Every structure is written in C-alpha cells, then in structure tokens.
Image (cartoon, rainbow, N blue to C red):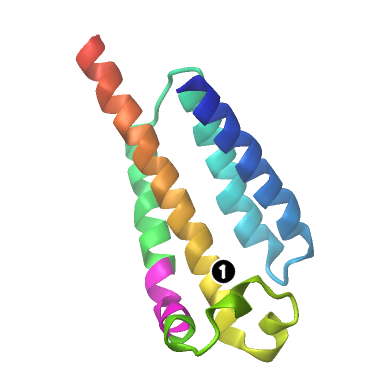
Amino acid sequence: MKILNATLAVLFLVFTIVQINDPDPYYWMFIYISMVGFSLLAFSEKFLPRIMLLFVGGYLHAMFQLRYGIKDWLLSENLSLLFEEFAKMQYPYIEESREFLGLAICLLAIGVFYFQYWKSLKNA
C-alpha cells in the first residue's frame, strides 16, 4: 500500500502544479494539495477520518454543482473532446466534466484511504 500511497501523492502533486494556469487556481490547488497531504498521511499509516469525511462532503457538493457539465459531455456525440485542449474554450461543459472527473479521482483515493484506515483498526 505504501507504493500506492506514494504514487497517489505524486499524482496529486502533478495535478496541483497543472492548476497554476487554471482560471481558478487556488480552489483547485487547495483540493489537490489536500489530497497530497492525505496520501502522505496514509503512506505513514496515519489517518484523519473525520477530516476526510468533511472533504468527501465538499467534493460531493462540488460534483453536484458540476452535474450538468458531465451530463452534457456524456450526451455529446464526441466523447473524445474531453482530451482535446481547444475543446474547453469551445464547449464549457468540457471544463466542468474535467473538474467532475478530478473530484471523482479524489473521492476514489479517499475511499482507498478509508479502506486502509479500517484495515489498520482491525489489525490493532
């Protein structure tokens, strides 16, 4: 699990750095740097379950706000637009879909950390 946690820390650090050129960098940098912190804590087998739950609530709220963007993308004729740089300027739902999927990755990672947390409680 340490390799997974270290990999997630690096991945979220890269996500954080990429956000520097984003129109709302502080919001997204905070989200991703928080995930770096959770990853590093999990790496050292320390967990903050209540704080992670607080972040889960925030991420779910943000995903709810982005629900129409992901819906529009899923109903679009060309799903590959998500990976084209020009598309975010042409289709606003592309950026919302990318943000939605970024939050989904965060939730998935927190799910992994929670699994590790409950496993550590059983082993204690």
Q: Position of residue 15 (x, y in %)?
A: 66, 51
Rendered residue at 53%/42% (across/down): 35
Q: Residue furthest left?
A: 122
Rendered residue at 71%/86% (across/down): 89
Residue carrying label 1: 98
Rendered residue at 74%/50% (across/down): 17
| Disc 1 residue type (three-letter) | Arg
As for residue 53 lying within the magenta part, the answer is no
As for residue 68 lying within the magenta part, the answer is yes
* Residue 71 figure quarter: bottom left
Image height of 45 relative to 76, above or below = above
Quadrant housing the C terminus: top left
Image height of 79 relative to 107, above or below = below
Q: Position of residue 20 (x, y in %)?
A: 77, 58
Quadrant housing the N terminus: top left
81 or 41, nearer to the observer: 81
Q: Residue furthest right?
A: 21
- Dominant secondary structure, magenta: helix
Rendered residue at 79%/64% (across/down): 21
The magenta segment? 63-71
- Secondary structure at badge 1 equals helix
